[in-house]
Image (cartoon, grey):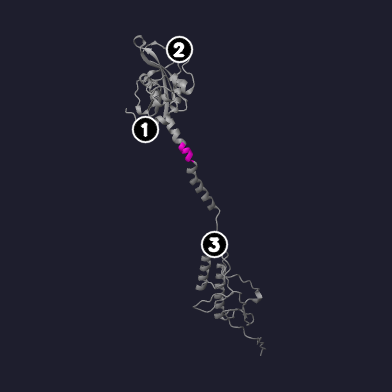
Amino acid sequence: MSTLLLNLDFGEPPPKKAVEGNAKHRKFVRKRRLLERRGFLNKKNQPPGKAPKLNSEPAKKGETSSVDGAWKVSPLPKKKSVASSSGPEQSLDKKVAVPWLTPAPAQKAGTSVGKVDLLGEFQSALPKIRNHPARPHKKGPQKNLTQKNAPQSSSQPHSDDKCSGASQKMVAIDCEMVGTGPKGHVSSLARCSIVSYHGDVLYDEYVLPPCHIVDYRTRWSGIRKQHMVNATPFKVARGQILKILTGKIVVGHAIHNDFKALQYFHPKSLTRDTSHIPPLNRKADCPENATMSLKTLTKKLLNRDIQVGKSGHSSVEDAQAAMELYKLVEVEWEQHLAQSPPKD
């Protein structure tokens, strides 16, 4: 018979796999990894030699997994966590990582206590954020102050605007006429000058009458034949003049003669004739109802000579003199007209 050799190993049999323990451990590891990813737990880096065995049971509450069957209790934090009323005290080694809040006692994720604490800390932090002074808000009141102060600072300009608005609606006019018609007895417009309240020239043109000129009246009008060469036709000049006079207060001396030459009627309420202003005559020590010449009033009240020489009158000079005479009694005369306005 042949020899039969058997190689038998009488060592300890291989340990059975604790299927149940491995499943619990894997479930525990999955939960821990999930909490680490969400930021509720810090990652636990253990050396490979100290890793828990597969057949070890999951860590009890308040304990950590042990090596070689020895359980070690984790140290408690300095501040105790708030215990929930519905269950036992939660694990204290799992900290909630919320970097923008103040440090708070660590709570186990997923519990009602942890959620309540986080909400309370969040609400307590809100007033600090709202009450914190922000730089952009400081500019707002400064803008409002400037807007509020604007009407006060512009109160003087507004009053000046009223005066300037009244002066813009006031002009002075003077016209020079030449003789037309039979023997030159008809006065026709040959020059018209309009000045503003401050004496600035608004219009000054020679006007060509529609009829043949018989007498130039150069001794008084200052008009000569050469002035009519490039003169503006009467119809054109009249339209230009009326655009300036319409709606304005018109000042002039014996102004009815000027309106007659223009073939125009201006409202009496907007007409100021310096030849019929009683306060002006009183200032010049003349009878109130007398009709004084522009030359006499200008000499007595303005101490200025006009209409001097043989070259004729200047319609610009006469219009400026009439406006200056009116301004001497403007307030008194306007108050009188307000009390008893003239009828058109």
The answer, for residue 220, to whether it is visible in the render is yes
Task: Check residue 338 in the rendering and tell me which mark sits there, or answer none.
Answer: 1
- Secondary structure under tag 1 reads helix
Q: Examine the rendered structure and indicate whether residue 316 appears above or below residue 28.
A: above
| Mark 3 neighbour density, 10 Å: few (under 14) some (14–19) many (20 or more) | few
Q: Residue furthest bottom?
A: 1
109 or 247: nearer the viewer: 247
Compared to residue 166, the image places residue 6 above or below, namely below
Alpha carbon of mark 3 to alpha carbon of mark 2: how far?
A: 91 Å
Residue 222 % position (x, y):
45, 14
Q: Amino acid at mark 1?
A: Ala
Q: Is residue 87 left or right of residue 263?
A: right
Residue labelled with disc 3: 128
Is residue 344 shown left or right of residue 76? Answer: left
Q: Which residues are magenta?
A: 154-159
Query: Distance between the Cα atoms at labels 1 and 2?
Result: 46 Å
Residue 245 position within the rendered picture, expressed as x and y whole percent measured from the top left = 39, 26
Give the residue at x 39% y 14%: 178
Q: Amino acid at mark 3?
A: Lys
